[in-house]
Amino acid sequence: MKKNTEITKEIKSVEKLIKKDLSKEKIISGLYKYIFKSSGKKIRAKLSLISSSTKNHKDRLKLASVIELLHTATLVHDDVVDNSLIRRGAKSVNNIWTNSHGVLIGDYIYSKAFMLMVDIGNKKILKELANATNDISQGELIQLESVQNINISINKLKKISFYKTGRLFEAAAKTGAILTSNSQAYIKNISECAKNLGMVFQIRDDLLDYSPEIEIGKPAFQDIKEGKVTYPFFYAFKNANQMEQRKLRTYLGNKKLNTSEVNYLITKLDGIKKTEQLARKYHIKAIESAKRINNLSVRQEMIELTNIALTRKK
Amino acid sequence: MKKNTEITKEIKSVEKLIKKDLSKEKIISGLYKYIFKSSGKKIRAKLSLISSSTKNHKDRLKLASVIELLHTATLVHDDVVDNSLIRRGAKSVNNIWTNSHGVLIGDYIYSKAFMLMVDIGNKKILKELANATNDISQGELIQLESVQNINISINKLKKISFYKTGRLFEAAAKTGAILTSNSQAYIKNISECAKNLGMVFQIRDDLLDYSPEIEIGKPAFQDIKEGKVTYPFFYAFKNANQMEQRKLRTYLGNKKLNTSEVNYLITKLDGIKKTEQLARKYHIKAIESAKRINNLSVRQEMIELTNIALTRKK
């Protein structure tokens, strides 16, 4: 198992690998370089590297790059879908260029991931990543269909969180494990852990969106403005009386809402507290799976990542 | 080698296969069924089936489905990129639903192709299709960047035609051949033939866009309205005097142009004639490669497809 500092070093190599073999077409390399300029957290690539760290393998960095490329392709398309203007603290592709550029460079990044995967050439890994990308696109579509749906169920919300986030976390860990281990128990435990860690990460994301902009360093209250019911809104709405429900309804999809008013009401109705409880529930599940991981250093790294996911402020 | 009627029957099976294992999510199956409702020409799937027809192989239909899925995914994204309202005689996804739906269901279809490919599990086929999808997305981006570029070179135009159309024709034939043949000569000849056939198909497409709407059964003069320089415009512009060039400039990207006026000027300046010459040039190349195909029936089928590509009215 590699030490944390080593993983950090490897992430740098992943960043380099992603930028290798750039297209000679100026428009393509320009878009591509812009997208990969800001470095981001790369938690999915890290997961892949940790999971595959039980042995040396020539394709470890390549696989982590694939995961990061897949994730970035979905981000670029998401920004088009949500009409988001900011990504990782900088203007989104669809903001600087156009939606069309976002769609096509997303496809380009996706196909690049696909080329690298094929290079690795492990059939089980290919299968897992094909299934995961399919699930991710399903999650995005279900989420799109749920916009402005005030009656969404908790199960649908969990399905969306799993498909759009948990699934790639799971695939990152699973494929990393497949690459370097034959232990079915190891593959299963780290996949389970990563899946729940992904849920914690997404729930925390939903919570952060209800925090003041100044604290998280990016536009806040985006979900509610886009008409997306996420956990804080869901729980608050459940606890609301008729008048409060009417109020909450007027917030959903309202681009010009008074955010401190929203914050007050959602907090008062336990939307934040209940969501924090849910995050802790998945955190416990993730830790339980982590504890079943035999490899001591991997176990520690996974526990650390899970704790970061729960407490991160950005 | 299967007879033409047999290929037609197989195309029906491909259509069924594409619709198998539909998502249980209503929004996804709804979009998906809508997209695959109209049957289209399926020339790429046909190419794949012809190319793989030298032997029986359990994955022939699956591979043809992959090709058709990949093609459809790019069409759905293209309609978002071009803001097209009509596809195959019906309203486009982005027209009935939204651009967001188009982006996400395109990704879904793409990942579905990917899953089927992995099922087939032939590394050479995976590699060719990964490279092809990458080239296709590059072609689309280059084309997007060339909008309103009156000074585009003939080489850039050919590159766009190859990347966005010839490349998948080539990959369809090549992967079909790889699936059922070990003959390097066969793989090379049919790939070459398909690539040039794809060029004929695209050039003919550009020509048809300059035909009266009533004849082709779909909106005409879309390219020029979208600001795209295609071959007819390119050649006409080259032959134009200064006054005519000024006129042509006003057409490009003009959504409300007088189409009979455009038609008159482009024809008068030999834009149509020169483009037909170019199509015939690629037609000859395709036929030459076809003649080198050893398998008599495949050769005949390929020649027939090439002739259809040159003369088709729709």
Image (spheres, coloured by chain):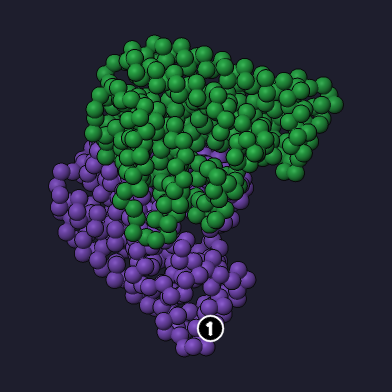
Chain colours: A purple, B green
Rendered location of residue B19, percent (x, y): 35, 48
Query: Residue B28: in sight, yes or no?
Result: yes
- Quadrant in the picture for residue A146: bottom left
- Quadrant in the picture for residue A308: bottom left
Rendered location of residue B128, percent (x, y): 37, 28
Under mark 1, the amino acid is Arg
Rendered location of residue A105, percent (x, y): 51, 41
**Which chain is indicated by disc 1?**
A
Left or right: B75, with A231 as reference point: right
How many labels were placed on the picture? Answer: 1
Q: Residue at x 35, y 30 (%)?
A: B5
Q: Residue at x 62, y 28 (%)?
A: B207
Quick check: A224 above or below A38?
below
Quick check: A95 above or below B142?
below
The front one of A272 and A83 is: A83
Q: Residue at x 41, y 78 (%)?
A: A235
Local secondary structure at mark 1: helix
Residue lying furthest front: B5
The front one of B238 and B12 is: B12
Q: Residue at x 43, y 25 (%)?
A: B170
Query: For mark 1, does the 10 Å Cα neighbourhood hold few (<14), some (14 to 19), or many (20 or more) residues?
Result: few
Query: Residue B126: in sight, yes or no?
Result: no
Q: Which residue is mark 1?
A: A246
Rendered location of residue B274, percent (x, y): 66, 19
The front one of A210 and B182 is: B182
